[in-house]
Each structure stands twice: as C-alpha cells, then as structure tokens.
C-alpha cells in the first residue's frame, strides 16, 4: 500500500499513529539496531498490522530516516546553544549539563544514534553529517578563538568535544554496563557525573 500523500495535512488520528509508529520503532532500533529491526517487528511493537504501518511509512528505511532526522536535531541542540558571547568556562559547563540532560531524558534516542553511527550510516552519511559538520566547525572556531584570546587553556578543540560527547553519552549508551559493574552508582549517576565532569573539565580548561 502506498504511503499517504506527503502534501496533505495529517489528521489528529494520523499524527497520533505516526508518533505511535516512531515510538515503537525507536524501541526496536535501540534494542536490535538497524540490521536486527524489521518492518514486521516494528508493526507488532506499535500494535498495528504491517499493511496499516505501511500506510504511514513506505519502508523501514523511511522510518529510520525520520528517527535519524529527529534524533540529530535533539543531539545538535545543546551544541547550537554554545554562545561565543558568554563566559567560556560557563558556556562549556552548560553544554556538558545539557548533554547529560539529553543522555538522562532520551536514552533510547542516544542508543539509536550510537547504533546508527556504529553501523556506518551506509545510506545517509552525507544527509546526517552535513548539518552536524557545519555546526561542529562553527563551534570549533569559537573554541579556538577563546584559546587564542587566553580565555581557556590551549587544548585540542576537536578532542575536547569528542571527550564531552563520550563522557556524557556513556551514561545512556552503556547503562547496562554501569548497572552490572557499579550498581551502587546507578541511582545517582547523572548527578554524580555532572559534579565529576564539571570539575574535570574546569581543571582542564583553567588558565
């Protein structure tokens, strides 16, 4: 069955069904990855028949692309808020806080995005990385300006961002590992992580 015409405004029920499908797909992709997910499994998880699901999305890849677009917007938002006009250390600390907030509030999205990156994004690499690369380069320039002005310590700005991404997303992407090897840290892990990471990056960037 062909997907409904994209140019027609969706009814309230159609919008609800679309969100229902995307929520179910997110669960499936986060758990099984793109290769392990199937349109039938997504339909079952959404409580729909496969033909019914295909009325809203023409394929598994169409669902995946919509999820990627939404997740990328979510993932980029904290970085876009890093202001060149603020106090550098404060701006970076707020960025870390926002990244931890994304990790805590959107763990499925974080796992989904991580799984997609690990898969190499074979069909949509330029589509995904184009907007991210543009934003990334803009913020690298901001960090480099702060370093040249002596407002933060001179470090590799690329590895600075990579480190922030790795340390903040770890708490969502590797939650099972944390639960198994450090169960005492599970309950307050985000509050403790914020204190630890802010202290660590402040020391790294102090001049």
Image (cartoon, helix red, strand yellow):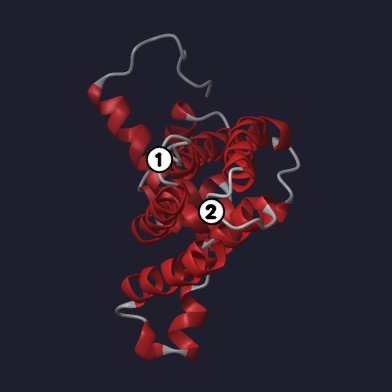
Q: Earlier in the sequence, mark 1 or mark 2?
A: 1
C-alpha span from label 1 to label 2: 32 Å
For label 1, the SS is loop
Q: Position of residue 132 (x, y in %)?
A: 61, 36
- Which quadrant, please, contains the C terminus? bottom right
At x 64%, y 31%, the residue is 134
Q: Position of residue 74 (x, y in %)?
A: 44, 41
Q: Nearer the viewer, residue 190 or 5?
A: 190
Q: Quarter-wise, where is residue 138 in the image?
A: top right
Say if 75 sits above or below 194 in the image.
Answer: above
CB of mark 1 within 8 Å of CB of mark 2?
A: no
- Is residue 184 shown above or below 26? below
Viewer-nearest residue: 54 or 29: 29
**Image point (60%, 62%), residue name:** 163
- Mark 2 is surrounded, within 10 Å at the Cα level, by few (under 14), some (14 to 19) or many (20 or more) other residues, namely many
Q: Secondary structure at mark 2?
A: helix
Q: Nearer the viewer, residue 69 or 54?
A: 69
- Vertically, is 8 above or below 21? above
**Residue most extreme to the left:** 12
Indicate the position of residue 25 as horizontal and vertical percent values.
Answer: 47, 47
Asked whether 157 or 177 is in front, the reply is 157
Residue 20, image x, y percentages: 34, 41
Task: Quickly name the residue at label 2.
Answer: 112
Look at mark 1 in the image and give the residue it sits on.
Answer: 86
Q: Is residue 66 above or below residue 87?
A: above
* Count of numbered tags: 2
Q: Residue at image x 76%, y 42%? A: 122
Write the residue at 37% across / 33% down.
18
| Of labels 1 and 2, the one closer to you | 1
Circle 1 Cα neighbour tier, 10 Å, few/some/many (<14 / 14–19 / ≥20) = few
- The circle on residue 72 is none
């Amino acid at each position: 069955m062909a997907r409904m015409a994209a140019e027609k405004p969706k009814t309230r029920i159609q919008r609800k069904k679309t969100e229902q499908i995307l929520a179910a797909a997110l669960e499936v992709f986060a758990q099984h990855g793109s290769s392990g997910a199937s349109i039938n499994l997504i339909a079952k998880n959404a409580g729909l028949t496969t033909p019914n699901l295909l009325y809203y999305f023409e394929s598994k890849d169409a669902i995946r692309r919509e999820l990627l677009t939404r997740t990328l917007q979510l993932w980029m938002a904290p970085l876009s808020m890093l202001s060149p006009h603020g106090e550098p250390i404060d701006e970076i600390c707020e960025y870390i806080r926002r990244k931890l907030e994304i990790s805590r509030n959107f763990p499925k999205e974080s796992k989904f995005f991580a799984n997609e990156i690990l898969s190499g994004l074979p069909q949509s690499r330029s589509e995904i990385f184009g907007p991210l690369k543009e934003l990334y380069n803009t913020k690298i320039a901001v960090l480099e300006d702060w370093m040249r002005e002596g407002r933060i310590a001179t470090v590799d700005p690329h590895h600075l961002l990579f480190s922030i991404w790795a340390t903040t997303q770890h708490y969502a992407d590797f939650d099972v590992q944390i639960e198994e090897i450090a169960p005492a840290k599970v309950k307050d892990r985000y509050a403790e992580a914020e204190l630890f990471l802010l202290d660590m990056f402040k020391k790294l960037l102090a001049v």
